[in-house]
Amino acid sequence: MIPSVLPTYNRAPLAFEKGEGSWLTTVDGARYLDLGAGIAVNALGHANPDLVAALTAQAGNLWHVSNLYQIPQQQKLADMLVEHTFADTVFFTNSGTEAAELAIKMARKYWYEKGAPERIEILTFDGAFHGRSTGAIAAAGSEKMVKGFGPLMPGFKSLPFGDHDALRAALTNKVAAVMVEPIQGEGGIRVLPDACLKGLRDLCDETGALMILDEVQCGVGRSGKLFAHEWSGITPDIMMVAKGIGGGFPLGAVLATENAASGMVAGSHGSTYGGNPLGCAVGAKVLEIVADPAFLAEVNRKSSLFRQGLEGLVASHPDVYEAVRGAGLILGLKCKAANTDVVKANYAQNLLTVPAADNVIRLLPALNITDEDIAEALTRLDKAATAVAATTP
Ligand SMILES: Cc1ncc(COP(=O)(O)O)c(C=O)c1O
């Protein structure tokens, strides 16, 4: 009999009832150290007092009004995002997938309004993940995600990751935009080198193609900059944001330059819940905290601390681990053992980690994880790796 919850996830037998900082407590009272943070969502940890205060204050006043009206909390967050980024304008969504949908629509509409309606193609890269809508699975193009869901939305081409020549050849005058994650999350914490991102920007400038960055997983302080592309010094035309921006409340956004957004006018897009007062009140508090240079400096310091320990872990468990990847607190351990076995061994140490493609486990702790919790995580990772090595033939 089919479970009452549609079985689209292989769920671990863990049910949590309370969270505090980087710790979660199960319904049975067991405590787990959380290095997943809801897959890069709980940017400021669980039950962060500042976010609880922002949410509850707003909840006592007004939960929802339609986008038919002015929404001051939305205006405030949009102004903050414009102040802190390349963007001139922002549309709020409830998720990363919805942000992907709008980014695609915006790029196509841009060319349509420019009198080049044939420029509809969106170039993406292998290993990419942009969500689960029919548009977003067409963009990712991975066999696993698209099988059985055809016909796929036309107009997407997936290129080999980091292959400059293939990219140049594909950038014809049919291309509306190139869409890329500066750091692939689901794809296995694969960092697109700064030189590639700069080269991509140059190619987009040469050909006119818009550059869409998907910072749903790597954005909002996670890389050690407010947005990961800032490391390379380039700016995109359009950027997708979600996950961390809501700190656990469903919130996403598409940020764009005035030029890239020029095709979008009243009636060309909308959302019932996108930009609701609750989400935006929380998002403004998250951004206020994360955009502080002192906070980002701490993310980088903690990243160095964690990374140093992880390098040691890899060196002492060469049968289990191969390498450390990533930036800031979006870190990955490329495994030699099966990554799913490593994640299970971590569960046995009451430690939550997240598998990714390319036989990687992801470490995406709260950005304000304490030094003590990093040390504790390293101890548990070490014990788990010893257990994996003991059972690996
Ligand atoms: C890079 C990236 N883009 C898009 C998405 C889709 O976001 P959501 O699950 O909020 O729809 C994800 C989710 O994991 C992601 O990592």
Image (cartoon, rainbow, N blue to C red):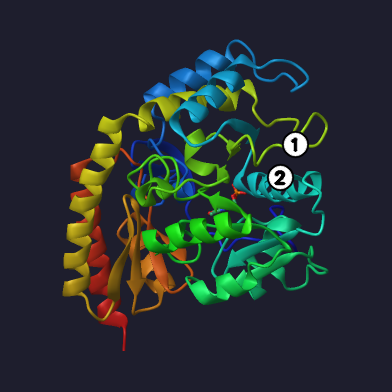
Q: Which residue has dot 2 on it? A: 106
Q: Is residue 178 above or below residue 243?
A: below
Quadrant containing the C terminus is: bottom left
Residue 13 can be seen, yes or no: no
Task: Provide residue 319's location: percent of width, then percent of height.
Answer: 26, 81
Foreground pick, 118 / 55: 118
| In the image: residue 387, left or right of residue 14 | left
Q: Which residue has dot 1 on it? A: 264
Residue 104 can be seen, yes or no: yes
Of all residues, the one furthest to the top in this rendering is: 61
Task: Provide residue 149's location: percent of width, then percent of height.
Answer: 78, 67
CA neighbours of label 1 inside 10 A, class few (<14), some (14 to 19), many (20+) = some
Foreground pick, 322 / 266: 266
| In the image: residue 105, left or right of residue 128 | right
Dividing the picture into quarters, in which one does residue 195 lie? bottom left
Task: Provide residue 20's location: percent of width, then percent of height.
Answer: 36, 35
Of all residues, the one furthest to the front in this rendering is: 206
Task: Provide residue 211's location: percent of width, then percent of height.
Answer: 58, 52
Under mark 2, the amino acid is Met
| In the image: residue 21, left or right of residue 105 | left
Q: Residue at x 68, y 67 (%)?
A: 172
Asked if labels 1 and 2 touch by Cβ distance under 8 angstroms, the answer is yes
Quadrant containing the N terminus is: bottom right
Foreground pick, 241 / 211: 211
- The earlier-in-sequence mark between 2 and 1 is 2
Q: Residue at x 72, y 18 (%)?
A: 65
Q: Is residue 69 above or below residue 389?
A: above
- How far apart are the two marked residues, 2 and 1, measured between alpha carbons? 7 Å
Q: Is residue 38 above or below residue 192?
A: above
Q: Secondary structure at mark 1?
A: loop
Under mark 1, the amino acid is Met
